[in-house]
Image (cartoon, rainbow, N blue to C red):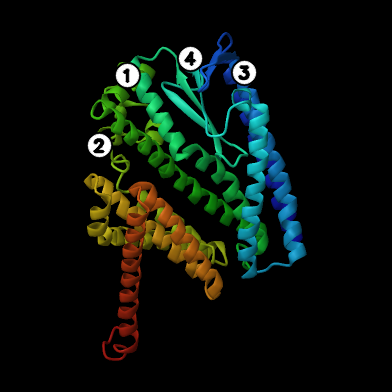
Amino acid sequence: MLSKTLGYAIFYTVITLMVIIISIIIISTMYSIKQSKSQKLIIQGRSGVAQSLTPVRFLLEVVFAVVTSFVIWILIIIDGIPFLFHVLNLSPPRGVFGALGLTVLFFALWLVIYGSMASYIIEPIRGAKPGSITYIYDEGVYGGYGGKVIEFFALSLKSPYKALIFIRKGLPTPVFDLVKAHEEAHVRGHHSLILISSVPFIYSLLWSLFMSGILTAPPRGPVFVFIMFKLFLLLLALGFLSIPVMRVFESKADAATYRVFGDRAYDYLVQALRLAYGDRVRSPRDAPFMDRLMHTSSRDAARTGDPLSSIGLWEFPVVFSFLAAVLVSMRASSLAVLSLLLPAFLLSSLIVIVLLGLVFLPVTKRFYGGTRRGYYNFSFLLSGIYTIISYLGALAFPDFAVMVLVLVVGLALAFLVIRSFLGRAGSALKLLLITYLVFVGVNALIFSLLLVRVVFLRGVVPWI
């Protein structure tokens, strides 16, 4: 039964990925040909030497490099991970370590394939040095109303990346400088690399967990439907999580422009939006929906310098509570139980994350500073991360080694997130220790109250 299920999973996975890849190639190529029949891309690196390249050729090179690397990598992990699990005979809880190890292995393999493809196929970066930025001036085909950045992994010990920055030709000087500062902030934060690499990493992890049996607890009902529904929920939750991540990255870039231009940054931003969408745009809230979805509606970071001032107060609690509810639902043995657990844990996780965030406020306000909305969002971000860590630890119970692994990896990621906002490792470590100890203390207090209720009040109070 399991082998038949694996066969269905492999078949539908391959078919879905191939349909997506073919659709991307067709749509991208048709759009590029329509928009850029007579245009040239002016490419200029740090050396100042400029050259021309047709947009169609450039697009085909990028699509070929990305698609080829993904196809090779997908075919390898689909065949390689089941083979390795069969050879190593990994099962829970050893399957957790096996899944993590194979995830790192196949992710590193994708980095090599992708970096090789990009470095030797795509013309603008073929001769670029690692760590360099190549500027491409176009007529809005790629850069849109302002600019766009693409990073590629460089197979070098000197620097892990090469970057392309697209900037629209003919922009007014203040807007041009703003766009340049915005996109260079993306490069310094490696935002594009993080988003690009998250896809193969998450896919490798989910496929490894699937093969290790972590997601295949004995179900009551059709095995294939149940497992695919769990994977769908995980991908949906991670997809929701990616939206605030992208919005935070854009807000960080907006905050970087504020540090360069001060109060003028917001005015220059509005000018760029009006050039793109017309004079009807009086503020970022008048921009089209997709722009507001990816860049936030307020763009307050461009006038405050606080990267979290543009994020809604509800975003982190809602996204993390949904992810937490999905993780807990992985232990469900049937679709009926899962449909009951999901909304219950969604609501309870939302309440927990909000209340813990309010408890963290005095500490985060002192360390983070910034605007009121900024340190509120920072508190909710930390409480959401700690809640996810605790839920993952509960899923690993009773295997102590796996619980420790989850805790160490989770706190390491939390430290990196905190440091990305505070900038100082010492302050980030202090805030991590203080807030996590508060988190543990609150949990211990709740457990103590429940223990008192069960042990000492049973039989004394009638309703217990």
Q: Can you tell which of label 4 and label 1 is closer to the viewer? A: 1
Q: Which residue is mark 2?
A: 304
For the residue labelled by badge 1, is the local secondary structure a helix, a strand or a loop? helix
Q: Amino acid at mark 1?
A: Pro
Q: Answer with the quarter of the image where residue 402 lies.
A: bottom right
Q: Amino acid at mark 4?
A: Glu
Residue 309, position in %: x, y?
A: 28, 41
Q: Quadrant of the C terminus?
A: bottom left
Write the residue at 36% across / 53% down: 381
Lower position in the chain sequence, tag 2 or tag 4: 4
Mark 2 in CB contact with mark 3 (< 8 angstroms) = no
Mark 4–mark 3 Cα distance, whole angstroms, equals 14 Å
Which mark is on residue 174? 1
Lower position in the chain sequence, tag 4 or tag 1: 4
Q: Answer with the quarter of the image where residue 435 lies.
A: bottom left
Q: Which residue is mark 3?
A: 56
Lower position in the chain sequence, tag 4 or tag 3: 3
Lower position in the chain sequence, tag 3 or tag 1: 3
* In-front residue for pair 23/134: 134
Mark 4–mark 1 Cα distance, whole angstroms, equals 18 Å
Lower position in the chain sequence, tag 2 or tag 3: 3
* In-front residue for pair 41/384: 41
Q: Which residue is mark 4?
A: 139
Residue 317, position in %: x, y?
A: 35, 53
